[in-house]
Amino acid sequence: MTRLLALLLGCGLLLAPAVRAADAPSAAPEARRGYLTFYLDNDLFAGTDRNYTNGARFSWISEGEPLVNVPMVRDELERLATADVRMIRALSGFREESLEQGTLELNYGLSLTQLMFTPEDFTALTQPPGQRRYAGWLGLGFSVHARDDSALNSAELILGTTGPNSLAEEAQDFIHDVRDFDKFRGWDAQIPNEVTLDLVFTQKRRIRILDRQDFGFSIDGLAEGGTRLGTFRTDAFVGGFFRAGLNLAADFSDPRVSATSYSHQVFDRSQPGRSGPWSVYALFGFRAAAVAHDATLDGPLFSDFDTGNEREPLVGDVFAGFGARLGPVEFTYAQTFRTKAFEEQRGSTDFGSLAVRVRL
């Protein structure tokens, strides 16, 4: 716990507010409203405890100004998110009038994420042959999100750490104590400490399949693509996410832990006020990633460390679940089936994902 506090303090100092004079008048209480979301991925929902065994994330996204402001970082992330870069502008997905009239909505996010990976055999003190290396990662992210009714572009900068400083062992031991499970004994063989820095860009485009019918039934979806460049992970990905249900609000939200998982409910200008105070829906989707570097499988980038695993260059997910919204609170659950992440892996990785978000 001491190391966690030290990491959060250090990251807090890095992201300490640097309010510019021009920003001061806009710091109204209304500008601080937003969504707080807790995400949990865990393979115990699938009856296993191995490979990608746990992911936890707290994310905050504001409806106005950011809680903290690092001008240089904020300015560059805003340029990426708002398509103020020639190549991105051409592929932004925003409506032309949104770009010409400057009516894009900007939101700012903060996130804290912990990922945990373990072998299947919890009794071995060293890495069991053919099984996954113990690995943990803890990261603090600062993000900017730009959107109109058609598309959302997100840019996030993530400062993190692998190894014992990620506190993955302590987190797993705590949960296993609470639930009276046997503890994993090989954490001394985990990948070493290394500070990581990653930049992530994600674009999501809304897909309207069936507009709201009688009783409020509709079907919609998102097409997603993006890339992550960094010392923890480098990849490119594409995917899709679809919902079918009653009173669906216009939404770009993620149902699972990812580098840019935030709540993104928007006001649908084409059908104002029609989503109502509640929603129920089924969800399903897929994602495919081409992976060039993964510190949990390749070892930390600047350390000569052999994980004993051979990373798979292509990884795919399919997932399905359900969700419900009542007023300012929304809950989703999804079950994911993931292809092998490393050559020695036996079978797929299966895990469940819970997400609870509250508008504050």
Image (tube, rainbow, N blue to C red):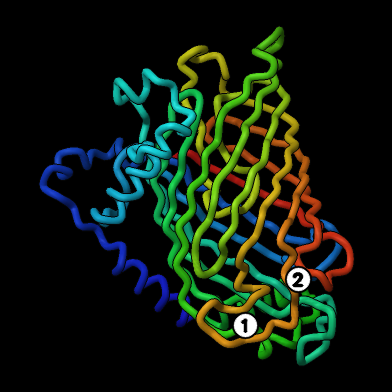
2 or 1: mark nearer the eye: 1
Q: Report whether 205 appears left or right of 338.
A: left
**What percent of the width, then of the height, locates residue 25?**
15, 39
Residue in front for this viewpoint, 203 or 322? 203
Identify the residue under disc 1: 191
For the question of whether residue 63 can be seen, the reply is no
**Would you say the residues marked 2 and 1 are in contact, meaning their CB atoms lie under 8 Å apart?**
no
Residue in front for this viewpoint, 229 or 280? 229
Query: In the figure, 109 relative to 294: above or below?
Result: above
Q: For the residue marked with disc 2, what is the amino acid?
A: Arg
- Disc sitting over residue 179 in the figure: 2
Q: Residue furthest right?
A: 347
Asked which secondary structure carries label 1, the reply is: loop
* Quarter of the figure with the C terminus: top left
User: For residue 306, what is the image quadrant?
Assistant: bottom right
Q: Residue at x 57, y 81 (%)?
A: 163
Whole-angstrom CA distance, mark 2 to mark 1, is 26 Å
For the question of whether residue 75 can be seen, the reply is yes
- Disc sitting over residue 50 in the figure: none
Q: Report whether 270 appears left or right of 169.
A: left
Q: For the residue marked with disc 1, what is the amino acid?
A: Ile
